[in-house]
Image: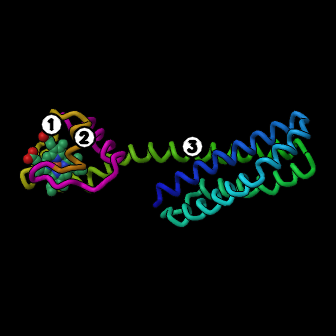
Protein backbone atom coordinates (compact mmCIF):
# COMPACT_ATOMS: atom_id res chain seq x y z
CA UNK A 1 0.00 0.00 0.00
CA UNK A 2 2.65 2.50 1.10
CA UNK A 3 4.83 1.93 -1.98
CA UNK A 4 1.83 2.17 -4.35
CA UNK A 5 0.78 5.47 -2.81
CA UNK A 6 4.37 6.68 -2.96
CA UNK A 7 4.46 5.82 -6.68
CA UNK A 8 1.20 7.67 -7.37
CA UNK A 9 2.56 10.60 -5.38
CA UNK A 10 5.81 10.75 -7.41
CA UNK A 11 3.97 10.46 -10.71
CA UNK A 12 1.44 13.17 -9.84
CA UNK A 13 4.19 15.44 -8.52
CA UNK A 14 6.13 14.98 -11.76
CA UNK A 15 3.12 15.80 -13.98
CA UNK A 16 2.19 18.74 -11.75
CA UNK A 17 5.77 19.98 -12.07
CA UNK A 18 5.78 19.67 -15.86
CA UNK A 19 2.54 21.60 -16.26
CA UNK A 20 3.85 24.24 -13.90
CA UNK A 21 7.17 24.43 -15.72
CA UNK A 22 5.55 24.87 -19.15
CA UNK A 23 3.20 27.52 -17.78
CA UNK A 24 6.11 29.44 -16.29
CA UNK A 25 8.02 29.26 -19.56
CA UNK A 26 5.01 30.50 -21.56
CA UNK A 27 4.39 33.34 -19.14
CA UNK A 28 8.04 34.39 -19.21
CA UNK A 29 8.19 34.36 -22.99
CA UNK A 30 5.07 36.57 -23.28
CA UNK A 31 3.20 33.83 -25.12
CA UNK A 32 -0.06 34.86 -23.55
CA UNK A 33 -2.33 33.24 -26.14
CA UNK A 34 -0.51 29.94 -25.93
CA UNK A 35 -0.56 30.17 -22.15
CA UNK A 36 -4.34 30.58 -22.12
CA UNK A 37 -4.75 27.66 -24.53
CA UNK A 38 -2.39 25.49 -22.51
CA UNK A 39 -4.25 26.39 -19.31
CA UNK A 40 -7.59 25.39 -20.75
CA UNK A 41 -6.20 22.14 -22.19
CA UNK A 42 -4.60 21.10 -18.93
CA UNK A 43 -7.26 22.38 -16.55
CA UNK A 44 -8.86 19.02 -15.76
CA UNK A 45 -5.57 17.13 -15.77
CA UNK A 46 -4.13 19.68 -13.39
CA UNK A 47 -7.13 19.37 -11.06
CA UNK A 48 -6.83 15.57 -10.96
CA UNK A 49 -3.08 15.62 -10.54
CA UNK A 50 -3.04 18.24 -7.80
CA UNK A 51 -5.80 16.44 -5.89
CA UNK A 52 -3.84 13.16 -6.12
CA UNK A 53 -0.64 14.98 -5.17
CA UNK A 54 -2.32 16.41 -2.06
CA UNK A 55 -4.23 13.30 -0.94
CA UNK A 56 -1.28 10.95 -1.39
CA UNK A 57 0.96 13.52 0.32
CA UNK A 58 -1.35 13.63 3.34
CA UNK A 59 -1.51 9.81 3.46
CA UNK A 60 2.30 9.56 3.32
CA UNK A 61 2.73 12.08 6.14
CA UNK A 62 0.45 10.05 8.42
CA UNK A 63 2.56 6.94 7.69
CA UNK A 64 5.94 8.48 8.41
CA UNK A 65 6.93 7.59 11.99
CA UNK A 66 8.48 10.93 12.83
CA UNK A 67 8.01 14.16 10.95
CA UNK A 68 11.46 15.46 10.13
CA UNK A 69 12.45 19.09 10.26
CA UNK A 70 13.32 19.04 6.55
CA UNK A 71 9.88 17.71 5.70
CA UNK A 72 8.18 20.55 7.58
CA UNK A 73 10.30 23.12 5.72
CA UNK A 74 9.48 21.39 2.43
CA UNK A 75 5.76 21.43 3.16
CA UNK A 76 5.85 25.09 4.19
CA UNK A 77 7.70 26.05 1.01
CA UNK A 78 5.28 24.09 -1.20
CA UNK A 79 2.25 25.48 0.65
CA UNK A 80 3.62 29.01 0.31
CA UNK A 81 4.33 28.70 -3.40
CA UNK A 82 0.76 27.75 -4.34
CA UNK A 83 -0.98 31.06 -3.50
CA UNK A 84 1.97 32.88 -5.05
CA UNK A 85 1.52 30.91 -8.27
CA UNK A 86 -2.22 31.56 -8.35
CA UNK A 87 -1.67 35.31 -8.01
CA UNK A 88 1.18 35.18 -10.54
CA UNK A 89 -0.98 33.57 -13.25
CA UNK A 90 -4.03 35.72 -12.49
CA UNK A 91 -2.01 38.93 -12.84
CA UNK A 92 0.48 37.56 -15.37
CA UNK A 93 3.22 38.62 -12.99
CA UNK A 94 6.52 37.16 -14.15
CA UNK A 95 8.51 37.86 -11.03
CA UNK A 96 5.96 36.14 -8.79
CA UNK A 97 5.80 33.20 -11.22
CA UNK A 98 9.57 32.84 -11.11
CA UNK A 99 9.69 33.07 -7.32
CA UNK A 100 7.00 30.45 -6.85
CA UNK A 101 8.63 28.14 -9.37
CA UNK A 102 12.00 28.57 -7.63
CA UNK A 103 10.30 27.72 -4.32
CA UNK A 104 8.95 24.43 -5.67
CA UNK A 105 12.32 23.50 -7.15
CA UNK A 106 14.00 24.36 -3.83
CA UNK A 107 11.50 22.21 -1.93
CA UNK A 108 12.30 19.20 -4.09
CA UNK A 109 16.01 19.92 -3.83
CA UNK A 110 15.59 19.79 -0.05
CA UNK A 111 13.73 16.49 -0.30
CA UNK A 112 16.59 14.99 -2.33
CA UNK A 113 19.15 16.31 0.12
CA UNK A 114 17.46 14.77 3.13
CA UNK A 115 17.18 11.47 1.25
CA UNK A 116 20.95 11.37 0.58
CA UNK A 117 21.61 12.22 4.21
CA UNK A 118 19.44 9.33 5.35
CA UNK A 119 21.56 6.86 3.38
CA UNK A 120 24.78 8.09 4.95
CA UNK A 121 23.20 7.90 8.41
CA UNK A 122 22.37 4.26 7.69
CA UNK A 123 25.97 3.53 6.74
CA UNK A 124 27.21 5.10 9.95
CA UNK A 125 24.72 2.84 11.75
CA UNK A 126 26.63 -0.31 10.73
CA UNK A 127 28.44 -0.34 14.06
CA UNK A 128 25.28 0.31 16.08
CA UNK A 129 23.40 -2.51 14.35
CA UNK A 130 26.36 -4.87 14.77
CA UNK A 131 26.55 -4.12 18.49
CA UNK A 132 22.82 -4.65 19.06
CA UNK A 133 22.10 -7.54 16.67
CA UNK A 134 25.31 -9.48 16.13
CA UNK A 135 27.62 -8.98 19.10
CA UNK A 136 25.51 -11.16 21.43
CA UNK A 137 26.68 -14.23 19.48
CA UNK A 138 29.78 -13.02 17.63
CA UNK A 139 31.16 -10.57 20.23
CA UNK A 140 32.31 -6.98 19.65
CA UNK A 141 35.60 -8.27 18.24
CA UNK A 142 33.91 -11.08 16.25
CA UNK A 143 35.60 -13.83 18.29
CA UNK A 144 33.02 -14.66 20.99
CA UNK A 145 31.74 -17.85 19.35
CA UNK A 146 28.50 -17.98 21.37
CA UNK A 147 26.14 -20.80 20.24
CA UNK A 148 28.75 -21.95 17.74
CA UNK A 149 28.96 -18.56 16.01
CA UNK A 150 31.79 -18.25 13.52
CA UNK A 151 34.84 -16.12 14.27
CA UNK A 152 34.14 -13.06 12.13
CA UNK A 153 37.68 -11.75 12.53
CA UNK A 154 38.75 -14.73 10.38
CA UNK A 155 35.94 -14.63 7.81
CA UNK A 156 36.87 -14.98 4.17
CA UNK A 157 33.43 -14.01 2.89
CA UNK A 158 32.61 -11.13 0.54
CA UNK A 159 30.19 -8.35 1.50
CA UNK A 160 27.40 -9.81 -0.68
CA UNK A 161 27.75 -13.22 1.00
CA UNK A 162 27.63 -11.65 4.46
CA UNK A 163 24.48 -9.73 3.46
CA UNK A 164 22.86 -13.01 2.33
CA UNK A 165 23.73 -14.70 5.66
CA UNK A 166 22.30 -11.76 7.64
CA UNK A 167 19.06 -11.71 5.66
CA UNK A 168 18.57 -15.48 5.26
CA UNK A 169 20.45 -17.02 8.20
CA UNK A 170 22.83 -19.96 7.96
CA UNK A 171 22.45 -23.24 9.89
CA UNK A 172 22.43 -22.29 13.60
CA UNK A 173 22.45 -18.58 12.80
CA UNK A 174 18.93 -17.23 12.62
CA UNK A 175 18.13 -14.61 10.00
CA UNK A 176 18.27 -11.11 11.41
CA UNK A 177 15.41 -8.70 10.51
CA UNK A 178 16.65 -5.58 8.75
CA UNK A 179 16.54 -3.78 5.42
CA UNK A 180 19.01 -4.56 2.67
CA UNK A 181 20.65 -1.14 3.15
CA UNK A 182 21.16 -1.88 6.81
CA UNK A 183 22.57 -5.35 6.04
CA UNK A 184 24.98 -3.72 3.57
CA UNK A 185 26.06 -1.26 6.25
CA UNK A 186 26.68 -4.07 8.76
CA UNK A 187 28.58 -6.18 6.20
CA UNK A 188 30.76 -3.17 5.45
CA UNK A 189 31.36 -2.68 9.16
CA UNK A 190 32.33 -6.36 9.61
CA UNK A 191 34.81 -6.28 6.72
CA UNK A 192 36.37 -2.94 7.64
CA UNK A 193 36.42 -3.16 11.42
CA UNK A 194 36.03 -6.76 12.64
CA UNK A 195 37.97 -8.73 10.06
CA UNK A 196 41.69 -8.85 10.85
C1 LIG B 1 21.91 -16.24 17.63
C2 LIG B 1 23.30 -16.09 17.41
C3 LIG B 1 23.75 -15.27 16.20
C4 LIG B 1 23.46 -13.98 15.90
C5 LIG B 1 22.54 -13.01 16.65
C6 LIG B 1 24.19 -13.65 14.69
N1 LIG B 1 24.91 -14.74 14.28
FE1 LIG B 1 26.13 -14.85 12.67
N2 LIG B 1 26.47 -16.79 13.02
C7 LIG B 1 25.94 -17.53 14.06
C8 LIG B 1 26.28 -18.91 13.90
C9 LIG B 1 25.89 -20.04 14.84
C10 LIG B 1 27.06 -19.01 12.72
C11 LIG B 1 27.66 -20.25 12.10
C12 LIG B 1 26.74 -20.73 11.00
C13 LIG B 1 27.35 -21.93 10.27
O1 LIG B 1 28.19 -21.71 9.42
O2 LIG B 1 26.91 -23.04 10.59
C14 LIG B 1 27.15 -17.65 12.20
C15 LIG B 1 27.83 -17.32 11.04
C16 LIG B 1 27.93 -16.04 10.55
C17 LIG B 1 28.70 -15.69 9.37
C18 LIG B 1 29.49 -16.62 8.48
C19 LIG B 1 30.95 -16.41 8.77
C20 LIG B 1 31.86 -17.26 7.93
O3 LIG B 1 32.99 -16.81 7.69
O4 LIG B 1 31.42 -18.33 7.50
C21 LIG B 1 28.58 -14.35 9.23
C22 LIG B 1 29.21 -13.45 8.15
C23 LIG B 1 27.74 -13.86 10.29
N3 LIG B 1 27.37 -14.93 11.09
C24 LIG B 1 27.40 -12.52 10.47
C25 LIG B 1 26.46 -12.09 11.41
C26 LIG B 1 26.02 -10.75 11.51
C27 LIG B 1 26.53 -9.60 10.65
C28 LIG B 1 25.09 -10.71 12.49
C29 LIG B 1 24.25 -9.55 12.91
C30 LIG B 1 23.43 -8.94 11.91
C31 LIG B 1 24.98 -12.06 13.04
N4 LIG B 1 25.83 -12.86 12.34
C32 LIG B 1 24.16 -12.41 14.09
C33 LIG B 1 25.20 -17.03 15.09
C34 LIG B 1 24.66 -15.76 15.17
Marker disc for residue 155? 1
First reached walking from the N terminus: tag 1 or tag 3: 3
Q: Position of residue 160 (x, y in %)?
A: 26, 37
Q: Nearer the viewer, residue 110 or 135?
A: 110
| Visible residue check, residue 15 | yes
Residue drawn at 63 percent across, 45 percent down = 14
The reply to whether the residue tagged 3 has its Cβ within 8 angstroms of ligand 1 is no
Label 1 and label 3: CA atoms lie apart by: 36 Å
Label 2 and label 1: CA atoms lie apart by: 9 Å
Q: Is residue 61 magenta?
A: no
Element assignment for label 1: loop
On the rendered structure, is 113 left or right of 147?
right
Residue drawn at 66 percent across, 46 percent down = 15
Residue drawn at 89 percent across, 36 percent down = 31
Marker disc for residue 190? 2
The reply to whether the residue tagged 2 has its Cβ within 8 angstroms of ligand 1 is yes
* Residue linked to disc 3: 113
First reached walking from the N terminus: tag 2 or tag 1: 1
First reached walking from the N terminus: tag 3 or tag 2: 3
Q: Nearer the viewer, mark 3 or mark 2?
A: 3
Q: Position of residue 24 (x, y in %)?
A: 81, 41
Amino acid sequence: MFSTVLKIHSISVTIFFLIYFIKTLLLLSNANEKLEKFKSYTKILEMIVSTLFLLTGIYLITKIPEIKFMLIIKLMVVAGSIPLAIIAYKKSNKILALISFAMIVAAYGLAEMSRTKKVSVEVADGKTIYETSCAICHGSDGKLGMAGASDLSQTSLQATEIVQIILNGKNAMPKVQMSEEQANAVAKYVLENIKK
